[in-house]
Image (tube, rainbow, N blue to C red):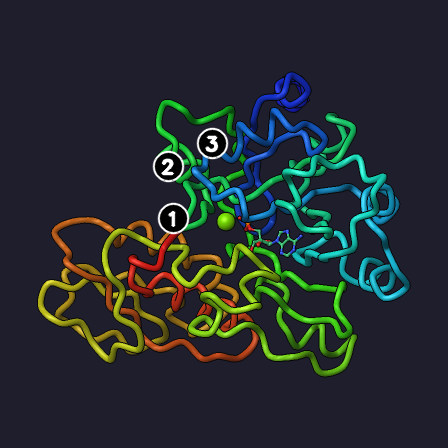
Amino acid sequence: PDTIDRAARILREGCLVAFPTETVYGLGADAASDAAIAKLYALKSRPHFNPLIVHVLSGAEAERIALVGALAASLIREFWPGPLTLVLPRPRTSPISLLASAGLDTVAVRSPAHPVARALLEAFGGPLVAPSANRSGHVSPTRPAHVEFDFGPAAPLILDGGPTQLGLESTVLDLTGEVAAILRPGALPRARLEDFLGPLLAPLNVSSVHGSNAALKSPGMLASHYAPRLPLRLNAASAEPGEALLAFGPNMPEGAIRTLNLSPRGDLAEAAANLFTHLRSLDAPPASAIAVMPIPVEGLGEAINDRLQRAARPRDTAR
Ligand code: AMP
Ligand code: MG
């Protein structure tokens, strides 16, 4: 409790704190403070057109910052707290800094389930913006050491909650258009949403996002993202000379410089939890590239494949 209080004090002073959520580690800042959010964008080197997710304790708190319609309210009752972010219309009276919306007339809101995240929100006493606690464009952090690695001596206070449980970012659902649409596949599988809402539009395709209207709708969905330094080769049956191997399932081809298996028993939840840690571990010399075995596109596999495709995109499209 003392550390949580100290963290809340740091946030109230307009500074940053990294904290665990059930998805990945977040970099928290006072969602009402322009100065704190400017610091956050600077530390991450995040492009200013990429808006932030506002974290709240409850649906009632969401109603104070966004327009929560009937559909949003029912999704909140069903899936909060949890890895579902809702993009909602932003009323002119919203107390959230305009920087968090990056010029859009919408605001993205989520209620995290992790007890440390909730204790911090409670102690702080208001909404926090919390993008993933990594340098912009890099692999998201699922352990405190990843946050330290990305920011070095500039790292803020990091609340250590151990490895995160889900390991993938939240699913982002847009409720501001004519139909609900997934802007980013994530830790809440599409099927769970479709059981509740009926069939949803296909998510944005990685290759079609760049320069399209879709990119304007979800400015964070850049083609190259979540990227390690080494190039990635997807759908590999085995490793070529010099490659490290990110394996999946019981069959492990030999010959890689180093092999890590996302889930030897082929379990997608286990693979999601290991994805970013294994990518970071394999992203080191003397390997010249990371070969990735195929991962089924069902359930959490949709979000896992989305992150891998972005990580594999040529870096000249990276921002
Ligand atoms: P991060 O917190 O770094 O995992 O990224 C947050 C994601 O939510 C990015 O893909 C953003 O583009 C998306 N996002 C945040 N706010 C909005 C918004 N108002 N409208 C659409 N997408 C948003
Ligand atoms: Mg991120």
Residue 83 in the figure: left or right of residue 293: right
Residue type, label 3:
Ala
* Residue 31 drawn above or below residue 264: above
Q: Which residue is mark 3?
A: 42
Percent x, y for residue 118?
Answer: 71, 38
Q: Earlier in the sequence, mark 1 or mark 2?
A: 1
Q: Residues within 10 Å of mark 2 (few under 14, many from 20)?
A: some
Residue shown at 21%/49% (left/top)? 284
The residue indicated by pointer 2 is 150
Instruction: Using the image as rendered, state which of residue 129 and residue 25 is in the foreground.
Output: 129
Residue 228, numbered label = none
Residue 227 position within the rendered picture, expressed as x and y whole percent measured from the top left? 35, 55
Residue furthest to the left: 241
Q: Check disc 1 and give the amino acid type.
A: His
Decide which of 125, 51 is in the foreground and name it: 51
Across and down, in percent, residue 190 comes to: 64, 73
Name the residue carrying label 1.
138
Q: Residue at x 9, y 68 (%)?
A: 241
Residue 175 lies in what quarter of the image? bottom right
For the residue marked with disc 2, what is the amino acid?
Asp
Whole-number angstrom distance, CA of label 1 to CA of label 2? 8 Å
Helix or strand or loop: what does disc 1 sit on?
loop
